[in-house]
Image: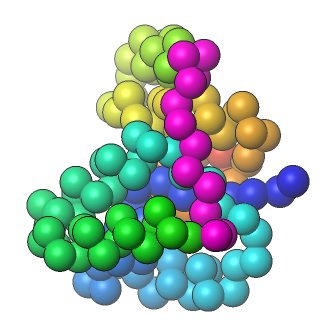
Amino acid sequence: MERVFVDTGGWFALVDSSDPAHRRAADWMDSNTLPLLTTDYVFDETVTLIRMELGHRIAVKFGEKLLASSMTQLASISPDDRNAAWQTFKRYRDQKLSFTDCSSFAVMRRFGIHRVLTTDHHFRVASFEVLL
């Protein structure tokens, strides 16, 4: 089944109307018919970022909407994903990758996902197709 991964940069661009990628992200989401996948680590990172940048009320509203979404699957990081992420984290010493990014790469590979809604160029470095 074809799906698209959504990273923190993609979620944040959708929520923050002042984000430079907001219009592109909103237009893409409006026309998208594919199921979406994100992870518990990305959920954590996103609600925290929204809380710090836009406020608690907006973070809670986003979190509730995402958790109730029938279009988005929230995958948990498995021990195998965590191990693969750690290997990636160690290997890319020339990139400022977060461990969350590395865990997202592992989950995308586990699910056979090649496209990602994000503003983070590190996904391109890891050979994924970045949609923003």
Q: Position of residue 14 (x, y in %)?
A: 42, 76
Q: Is residue 125 visible?
A: no
Can I make out residue 54 in this image? yes
Q: Quadrant of the C terminus?
A: bottom right
Residue at 72% x, 65% y is 35
**Chosen colour scheme:** rainbow
Q: Residue furthest right?
A: 1
For residue 71: magenta?
yes
Number of numbered discs on residues: 0
Magenta stretch: includes residue 73: yes
Horizontal side, residue 13 vs residue 113: left or right: left
Seen from the viewer's position, the closer of residues 86 and 61 is 61
- Which residue occupies 42% across, 47% down? 42
Percent x, y of residue 87: 51, 12
- Residue 11 position in % (x across, y down): 42, 66
| Residue beneath the point at 61% across and 80% down | 28
Rendering coords of residue 119 (x, y %):
44, 60
- The span picked out in magenta is 70-81
Residue 64 lies, with reference to residue 118, above or below; the image says: below
Image: 90 above or below 108: above
What residue sits 26% from the left and 83% below the top?
A: 18
Q: Quadrant of the N terminus?
A: bottom right
Question: Does residue 34 sit above or below 29 in this rendering?
Answer: above
